[in-house]
Amino acid sequence: MYNTELFTESRCIHVGIDIGGPIGTPVKSIANGVVAFSGYNPADGDYGHTVIIHHLIQGQNLWVLYGHLDAASTENCTPGKEVSGGEIIAWFGAEDENGGWPSHLHFQLSYREPTTYDLPGVVTPSEREQALLDFPDPRLVLGPLY
């Protein structure tokens, strides 16, 4: 699955969740928040077009990364834009714009404040312990998916 230069043999622990669906599937904000970052990660195997939204939930800062998005759908996701829970913020992108992946959404929570439109979505075993502290289980927000 991880067959580009971004992934070494030891970088194999996925810290988000991938949700499959057809190109153009709408992506909704999980709660009220503010777009923190929006950008394009161009490397083969990377996120492609990405949006990160900052939320304050029960007094806890939480950033949500939505990756592998359609380019045109992220044009209105400018930093500082307020979004409402349930609002469509983007759509699933095609392989030629989402890092070369079959159509899906990479959904990742972060307690760690990002500094750009990128977060490590896959870590090494030696980074696992810190990643578990920084990136909580997405099912805390999405519910029991499996």
Image: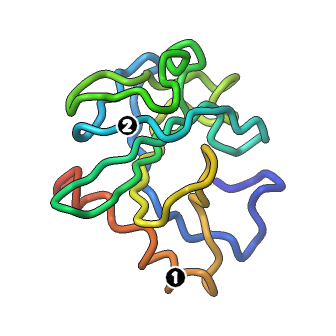
At label 1, counting other C-alpha atoms closer than 10 Å, the crowd grade (few under 14, some 14-19, many 20 or more) is few
Position in image of residue 79 (x %, y %): 51, 32
Which of the 4 image quadrants contains residue 89?
top left
Q: Is residue 68 left or right of residue 143?
A: right
How far apart are the two marked residues, 2 and 1, measured between alpha carbons? 26 Å
Toward the top, the furthest residue is 72
Quarter of image, res 40: top right
Residue that label 2 marks: 34
* Vertical arrangement, residue 91 with respect to residue 112, above or below: above
Residue 23 image offset from top left, x and y in percent: 47, 19
115 and 107: which one is in front?
115
Residue underneath mark 1: 130
SS for callout 1:
helix
- Residue closest to the eye, 140 or 116: 116
Picture quarter with the C terminus:
bottom left
Q: Amino acid at mark 2?
A: Val
Q: Residue at x 43, y 53 (%)?
A: 108
The amino acid beneath tag 1 is: Gln
Q: Is residue 67 above or below residue 143?
A: above
- Percent position (x, y) of residue 32? 23, 37
Question: Looking at this view, is 81 or 87 the one in front?
Answer: 81
